[in-house]
Amino acid sequence: MGDTKGIGEGERACGPVRPAPSGPGFVVTGYDAAREALRDPRLSKDTAAFFAGKESSRRLHPAVSRTMLASDPPHHTRLRKLVTKAFTTGAVARLRPYIARVTDELLDAWHAGEPYDFVAGVAEPLPVTVICELLGVPHTDRPHVRRWSGELFAAGRPEVIDAASHGLAGYMTDLIAAKRHHPGDSLLDDLIAARDGDDRLTEPELVSLAVLLLVAGHETTTHALGNALLSLLRHPAQLDRLRRDPDHIPAALDELLRHDSAVSTATFRYTTEPVTLGDTKIPAGAPVLVSIGAANRDATRFPNPDTLDLNRDASAHLAFGHGIHRCVGAPLARAEMEIVLRAVLKRVPPFELAVPEGVLEWRRTRLVRGLVSLPLVY
């Protein structure tokens, strides 16, 4: 199983909830405790309130540090309502032909006998192209947007992250201003109408929503695609099954998402009052980190968790979160994964890794986990 084997086993040996190994707070690795933590309203996501008055050398733009993800009801409820309609089943269905067309164009560059980096070739450009299309980002600007978005996850390089946050927020501010003069029919145009209409989004809220949708709309999907394809390569019988029966792909997505989640740890939460998770008493004001990857590999919920089993009912996985903060873009992510897997298995003959698995490089941050590259060949 290589890099993914035993995710969370060491942590769970200390119990499903335990003090963080470094710094204050608690880490949740057990499935039941994670699910409970994700839906408990006593675990706040209002990071501005938590860090108020605390000194910091960081200079993240507020559009990145104070997004919808970092808020509680009723503020969160109001903002989420404005974007949910863009990711309904019907709305995503209308995007499917566009997603399929872009996927085919990207796969045209994969030729027999030549190594093809699936991450750089498909997994990265497809989701960002789709979300930029949805938001109405001009084609000429998309490379810059993609670079800033990627730099927001530059682990260990806070100066790069901070600079990217200002670059992306500044760009979105300018794009919003341009769209006010030349309106279109994109999701961003709809949000601008809400800003200037009865819903009364503030200008900072509008910019923050635009930045969040752009970043969250593709970064995790990129990693989910790469992780899924590598999981299938590691389980050739499961890969062969999907090649023989591509109509099983939609049902297989839950197990692929569970087996190697692109989200390592859920976004920041803290207790607003004393909370008991499992058998652990957590005091008020304590940060709580929910390990999605570990919870999805909890053997008490998913027997033989390190094995990819496409017959497994994994619909209760936590890769998209749980509760009121469950990923609003999950229907779009699932559609992109299904369309890409169908296209690869239909168009590409049996393929394999073009390099030894041991040299694959993983991009890890506290929040996301995915491959830097995935060289393949047929």
Image (tube, helix red, strand yellow):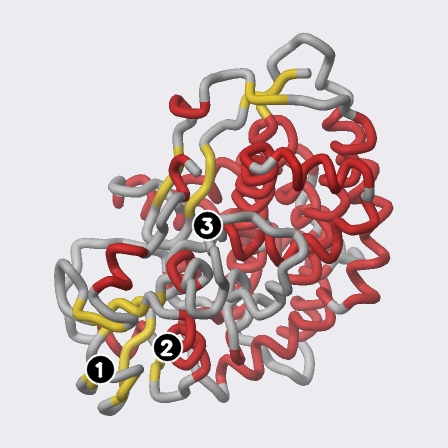
**C-beta proximity under 8 Å, tags 2 and 1:** yes
Residue 169 visible within the image = no
Q: Marks 2 and 3: which is nearer the front?
A: 3
Three-letter code for the amino acid on which mark 3 is drawn: Asp
Task: Say which quarter of the image contains residue 14.
Answer: bottom left
Three-letter code for the amino acid on which mark 1 is drawn: Thr
SS of the residue under disc 2: helix
How far is mark 2 from mark 1, CA to CA? 10 Å
Q: Position of residue 186 (x, y in %)?
A: 75, 57
Residue 134 visible within the image = yes
| Residue in the image at 57% along x and 28% along y | 120
How far is mark 2 from mark 3, CA to CA? 20 Å
Earlier residue among tags 1 and 3: 1
Mark 3, residue position: 306
Mark 1, residue position: 280
Earlier residue among tags 2 and 1: 2
* Label 2: how many Cα within 10 Å (few below 14, some 14–19, many 20+): some
**C-beta proximity under 8 Å, tags 1 and 3:** no
Left/right placement of residue 43 relative to residue 244 reads left
| Residue in the image at 72% along x and 40% along y | 341
Q: Position of residue 20 (x, y in %)?
A: 18, 64
Q: Which mark is residue 33?
A: 2
